[in-house]
């Protein structure tokens, strides 16, 4: 019966993860569209404020207090730092390089999360899955192409953002159970406001009066982000990390499709080859995770 319960939790968590990835891809498209006329710092502040307001309202409706002692616990402090890092550098990369390339690089997040789950939480990850993790990272290197004429230093922004998101997801796993998804979402979006403010301090840019289209894009990003964020946080707290996390690769399909269809981006052979390695590594990790769960 314990195995059945574990399988059901993993299935539920996987469906939540796929839903989150689809909506996150839509959020990315909105942000990229908004970045054509609005400064990155302004987008982050508006986006973060809108998301925090949504989660604050939902928490109020559910009578969940936003301010409690667990909010300043060590995992939450670490989570805020990674959230700021991930959001700032990822948003910068979306605004500066093709959405499809950023999406591919982001797919290294599950590899880092699974490795972190083994190192930090002691989850069992055998040598086969470790090989898969390193194979996936090689796929990322093929996409980035360091040391070649095709390499862009701007790709490093996406890599730093990816590491930030992986750290945030692991910290969410360690966050006190007393903190609901709504509370985590509220503070996650507040961290985005801080990221925007820090970027404006580092690179002062005057605010721009948003056009109707820009307002529509930012509002769409806020709504998509709030929904996707909720699904992601629930997914990371449902089932095993090593079983649920690989489904983050579904974002690859959604992100590349939006990049090609909406922004006319082209797919290179290196991107396709690297993406294939990343996806195959993720599928292998998923298969091994299920097999280990059944053997238990």
Image (cartoon, rainbow, N blue to C red):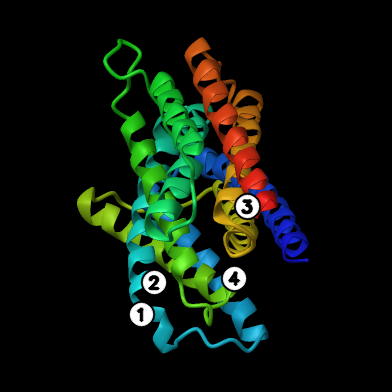
Give whichever of 127, 149 is nearer the camera.
Answer: 127
Is the N terminus in the top left, top right, bottom left or bottom right quadrant? Answer: bottom right
Q: Nearer the viewer, mark 3 or mark 1?
A: 1
Q: Position of residue 264 (x, y in %)?
A: 59, 21
Dot 2 lies on which element?
A: helix
Left or right of residue 270, residue 18 in this image: right
Residue placed under numbered mark 3 in the picture: 220
Q: Position of residue 166 (x, y in %)?
A: 43, 50
Which disc, if any, is residue 72? 1
Dot 4 lies on which element?
A: helix
Residue placed under numbered mark 4 in the picture: 54
Considering only vertical position in the picture, is 74 above or below 35?
A: below
Question: Looking at the image, do the residues carrying marks 2 and 1 touch, with CB atoms under 8 Å apart?
Answer: yes
Spatial CA distance of label 4 from label 1 is 21 Å
Residue density around tag 2, few if under 14, some if 14–19, many if 20 or more, within 10 Å: many
Residue placed under numbered mark 2 in the picture: 76
């Amino acid at each position: 019966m314990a195995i059945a319960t574990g399988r059901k939790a993993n299935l539920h968590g996987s469906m939540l993860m796929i839903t989150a990835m689809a909506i996150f891809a839509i959020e990315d498209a909105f942000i990229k569209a908004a970045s054509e006329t609005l400064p990155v710092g302004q987008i982050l502040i508006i986006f973060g404020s809108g998301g925090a307001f949504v989660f604050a309202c939902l928490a109020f409706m559910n009578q969940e207090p936003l301010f409690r002692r667990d909010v300043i616990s060590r995992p939450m402090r670490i989570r805020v730092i990674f959230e700021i890092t991930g959001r700032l550098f990822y948003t910068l990369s979306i605004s500066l390089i093709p959405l499809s390339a950023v999406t591919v690089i982001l797919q290294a997040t599950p590899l880092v999360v699974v490795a972190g789950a083994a190192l930090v939480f002691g989850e069992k990850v055998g040598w086969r899955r470790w090989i898969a993790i390193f194979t996936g990272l090689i796929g990322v290197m093929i996409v980035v192409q360091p040391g070649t004429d095709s390499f862009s230093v701007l790709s490093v922004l996406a890599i730093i953002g990816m590491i930030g998101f992986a750290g945030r997801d692991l910290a969410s796993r360690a966050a006190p159970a007393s903190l609901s998804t709504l509370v985590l979402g509220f503070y996650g979006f507040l961290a985005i406001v801080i990221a925007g403010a820090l970027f404006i301090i580092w690179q002062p840019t005057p605010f721009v009066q948003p056009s109707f289209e820009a307002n529509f894009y930012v509002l769409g990003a806020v709504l998509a982000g709030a929904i996707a964020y909720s699904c992601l946080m629930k997914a990371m707290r449902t089932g095993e990390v090593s079983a649920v996390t690989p489904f983050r690769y579904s974002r690859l399909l959604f992100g590349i499709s939006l990049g090609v269809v909406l922004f006319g981006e082209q797919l290179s052979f290196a991107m396709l080859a690297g993406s294939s390695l990343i996806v195959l590594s993720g599928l292998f990790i998923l298969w091994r995770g299920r097999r280990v769960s059944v053997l238990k």
